Image: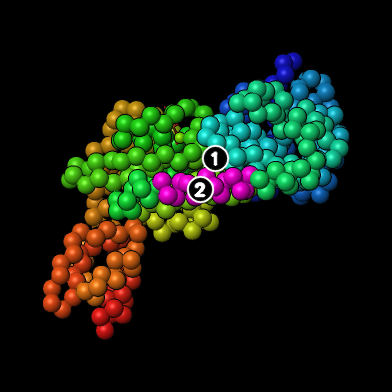
Amino acid sequence: MDDNSVLLITLAKAGMNTRSAYNAEMEIRSLLETLEMRVSFHIPFSLKEENPNTLIGPGQAEQAGRIASETGVQTVVVNAFLSARMEKNLERIFSLPVLDREAVILSIFLRNAHSKEAMLQIEKAEAEYLKPRLRGRISNLEQQRGGVKGSKGLGERMIELDRRKLERRIATIDRELDKISKVRETQKKDRLSGSLFSFALVGYTNAGKSSLMNALTGADVLIEDKLFATLDTTTRKLRLKNGETVLLSDTVGFINDLPHRLISAFSSTLKEALDASALIIVQDLENPDSYNNFLTTVNTLKELGAEDKIKLLVLNKADREYDDFNTIRLKNYGYDYVVTSVKEKTGLEELLDKLEKIAEEEEKIIEIRTPLDGSAFSLIRKDDSIISAIYKEDGLYLRIRIRKAFLPYYEKLEKSLMP
Ligand SMILES: Nc1nc2c(ncn2[C@@H]2O[C@H](COP(=O)(O)OP(=O)(O)OP(=O)(O)O)[C@@H](O)[C@H]2O)c(=O)[nH]1
Ligand SMILES: [Mg+2]
């Protein structure tokens, strides 16, 4: 049996239908494929109640242990979140390293991080994951990954580091991340001069966000048929047909049960994207669970407080075969949508038209009367831009392109400045 062979345990909770169990199995399989781990045996357990020591029942654990030793696999993967205690107990029963869903996703992030910021963010999430797991663990966790950008496997690090070292490291990482995000803030201000309307592409991993970004802006973001190919936020200018220039951002994708640790680790990168004026959800139709994946995206955006910004749904990979029922539900959910195939370049013109419309609808040009001394300039929101300033006898008239949502702000401002 080779080093990457895995015994996969999936859990069907009470009330879960066979179809969603199947989809969940396919998803963890593609996560493992992304890590080049090979599932040589799969056990679907049904979980009636959670055992606090091992999650699965003692009989199930024993059965899995027997299969693991008979098949000679190197690792056991459980597609669930395990507490440190559950993980430790299962490793003792199996005499093998156990990876839970969070460890799998973390390993993929570790492997795909390229920028300094992404690496630091993941190292922090990893350190926090490891903290409660330091003692008494089988320590060849995830070594097979090996040699990625000089970063060691989860297990290797575990031996080297004790809890206090981890805490110190987390504090250092926090300081470094803080510096990076400050630099980025100032760069952003220079680059964007705060005045362009901006869109961010968000959505489930592998939906085609980066492909769409590249197709529309000529950027060369890495595109891969792997999960979490993108971890950094990239922003490019996009010229619409009416001549207006807007910004388009591509960012990290979401997944069902994305560990909270990772969402918070990526909060500053995500924030950069979610600060956009409008969000576009990209969802591929090909995924058999497309509707649920879309709901995951919407719910994640809700948790991040960005739900109000969702303006359009792009249903991508229309060149592939897809499930009609899911597709109908996606179309009827309530967002305006466009059906595209980035691969065959269909639907892109319609998408551009919609972007134009959104920018127009979301923006408004207003004129306000302000004091002649120019003191109002510093009160204009940084996302809004002054088009002209005209001196008249009774005041300085500013024409401003604003986000519609901030109309009340300017109405109040005018009243308070020129009572
Ligand atoms: N058939 C088909 N494949 C597509 C289409 N758009 C993208 N793909 C493929 O889907 C895979 C994922 O594309 P990406 O653009 O990397 O997806 P992403 O949403 O950026 O994914 P992450 O960054 O991993 O979250 C790649 O293999 C693309 O070539 C499409 O319209 N049709
Ligand atoms: Mg991508």
> Dot 2, crowdedness within 10 Å: few (<14), some or many (≥20)?
some
Q: Nearer the viewer, residue 4 or 121?
A: 121
Does 390 sit above or below residue 123? below
Secondary structure, mark 2, is helix
Magenta stretch, main secondary structure, is helix
> Disc 1 marks which residue?
117
Point out the image quarter for the C terminus. Answer: bottom left
- Asked if the residue under mark 1 is in contact with the one under mark 2, i.e. CB atoms within 8 Å, the reply is yes
Q: Position of residue 333 (x, y in %)?
A: 40, 52
Q: Which mark is residue 181?
A: 2
Residue at left 76%, top 23%?
A: 74
Q: Quadrant of residue 108?
A: top right
Taking the magenta stretch, the answer to whether it contains residue 135 is no
- Residue 163 showing in the rendered view: yes
Give the left or right position of residue 140, taking residue 172 as reference: right
Earlier-in-chain disc, 2 versus 1:
1
Name the kind of residue labelled 2 in the image. Answer: Ser
What is the crowding at mark 1: few (fewer than 14 residues within 10 Å), some, or many (at least 20)? Answer: many
- x, y percentage for residue 70? 82, 21
Whole-number angstrom distance, CA of label 2 to CA of label 1: 9 Å
